[in-house]
Amino acid sequence: MGVPSRYEVATLTGVYYGSEEAFIGDCLTSVVEEEGPSIKESFTPYKTRFLIKSLREVPSFNRFIEDLFIRYSIRKETSGSITLIGKDLDSFRSFYEELSAKILKPVAKELPDSRHLSQVIRQVVETRGLTQTRLE
């Protein structure tokens, strides 16, 4: 086991986390570091906690995660915290590759990036500003 590296989730064989959400957070961090600027730009405007909470609120995401644990032989022990142990050397790599390919990267591509959010803010502020100016 040992101390997990946030940026190398795919190299783990066993790991201890305070919660499953912390593990998912490290998967998010890993995909950002692995993919570089394009995904980083998409995720930057959002707090990691918000992204994880939003994913966890989708029941099919939780089922998908549980299915990945089973499919890639990652045993999960929960007792206030979580210990994940991969049966095979590539258990975590396979888990991470499928999670990032099917969920994390597609989510990043669909999220409005910081430029888009800035444009929306500018549009709302300028529109509201013009409306208020005309009303006065």
Image (cartoon, rainbow, N blue to C red):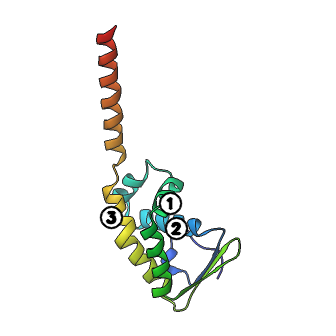
Three-letter code, disc 2: Ile
- Circle 3 — which element? helix
- Circle 2 — which element? helix
Judging by the rendered image, the residue that carries numbered circle 2 is 24
Three-letter code, disc 3: Pro
- Circle 1 — which element? helix
Task: Please name the residue shown 64% across and 82% down the image.
Answer: 1
Distance between the alpha carbons at the discs numbered 2 and 1: 7 Å
Answer with left or right where residue 49 lies relative to residue 32: right
From this view, report whether residue 130 is shown above or below residue 2: above
Which label number is shown at residue 73? none
Residue 107 placed where, x, y %?
Answer: 36, 61
- The part of the image, by quadrant, that contains residue 118 is top left
The answer to whether marks 2 and 1 mark residues whose Cβ atoms lie closer than 8 Å is yes
Q: Residues within 10 Å of mark 1 (few under 14, many from 20)?
A: some
Mark 3 and mark 1 lie on one chain; the one further toward the N terminus is: 1
Which label number is shown at residue 52? 1
Residue 97 placed where, x, y %?
Answer: 40, 77
Task: Please name the residue shown 43% across and 62% down the image.
Answer: 32
Q: How many marks?
A: 3
Distance between the alpha carbons at the discs numbered 3 and 1: 15 Å
Mark 3 and mark 2 lie on one chain; the one further toward the N terminus is: 2
Which label number is shown at residue 106? 3
Answer with left or right where residue 12 lies relative to residue 134: right
Q: Nearer the viewer, residue 54 or 109?
A: 54
From this view, report whether residue 57 is shown above or below residue 122: below
Residue 59 placed where, x, y %?
Answer: 46, 67
- The part of the image, by quadrant, that contains residue 22 is bottom right
Q: Nearer the viewer, residue 81 or 36?
A: 81
